[in-house]
Image (tube, grey):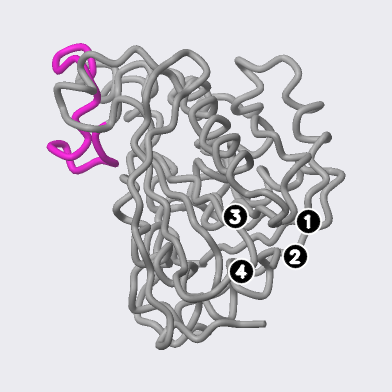
Amino acid sequence: MLYDGRHNDVRRAPVTITADDGRELAGTWFEPTGVDPVGVVVVGPAMATPASYYAAFATWLATQGLRTLTFDLRGTESVAAMKAEDADVLRWFGDMADALDHALAEAGDLPVSWVGHSLGGQAVPFLDHSRLARVVTVASGTGYWRLNSPGIKWRAPLLWHVIAPLATRAAGYYPGRSLRILDNVPAGVMRQWGRWCLHADYLGVDVPNAADRFASVTAPMTVLSFTDDELMSDASIADLHDRFVNADQVRQRYSPAQLEVPRMGHHGFFRARHQDLWDELVLPYLAR
């Protein structure tokens, strides 16, 4: 049964998620009210993207009867927090795994789906994916520079070899917002991400069993990507998802014209104005 959001209220409930090392992560449950929930969704965020960015999407999911959890990764609360943070990307994957564990503990008998935006899609092999009923990735690929979208491909080496190291050393974190190149990121995250982006094996540089991790994922996957993504090319999307050799996949790539929108880009899909697209491109692929 589908729930018409016009007739259902949504309750937001702040929650503290305790990571495996004791760190506390801020999260929010978006709860359907007036109806029994039919499933659970966890939204894995993109690099340097706050949980608040997904609030409209999570609210819509809740109107469909899906309890939805959003959360912030450690060290993203403020510039001061970034300067003090020693996390790297793998630690952020651990935070995503801990958020999923929290949701699984709360889910009871309800099926759980993971919606991973960009970095959130890369995290899937590091989650308890054996308990996921469905996975949806959005604008998610590897960051290997030779596969980047044409607009940034030949500037990437300058970023990773010169700009990012110098800016991070000077500021104590990567000040991407000030530089207008990506966004603010803790220093350890930026250093590890840069190492991955310069290597064809991407995260395999630091994860010796990466191929086995990807091969262990068997949850059905829906892959959404967009031709005007300024970061992820078709090749980088394929580079990530070709590694999921044992997961049944539905891959869907759209141009803005096909979706009848002026622009989609890397972050646009989660904007509130795209609810009609969520109905068509996401809802059928979530476990209920």
Query: Can you tell which of label 4 and label 2 is closer to the viewer?
Result: 2
Q: CA distance from mark 1 to mark 2?
A: 8 Å
State which region is magenta. 168-184
Asked if marks 3 and 2 touch (Cβ < 8 Å), the reply is no
- Residue 28 point in image, percent of width and height: 37, 48
First reached walking from the N terminus: tag 3 or tag 4: 3
Quarter containing the C terminus:
bottom right
First reached walking from the N terminus: tag 1 or tag 4: 1
Question: Which residue does the numbered mark 1 point to in the structure image?
Answer: 220
| Rendering quarter of residue 179 | top left
**219 relative to 265 in the view: left or right:** right
Q: Label 3 crowding class (10 Å Cα cut-off): few <14, some 14-19, many 20+? A: many
Residue 173 in magenta?
A: yes
Specify the amino acid type for callout 3: Thr
The kind of secondary structure element at disc 1 is loop
Question: Which residue does the numbered mark 4 point to in the structure image?
Answer: 253
The residue drawn where x is 82% and y is 34% is 216
The residue drawn where x is 72% and y is 24% is 210
Question: Which residue does the numbered mark 2 point to in the structure image?
Answer: 250
Asked if marks 1 and 2 touch (Cβ < 8 Å), the reply is yes
Residue 26 in magenta?
A: no
- Residue 162 point in image, percent of width and height: 29, 20
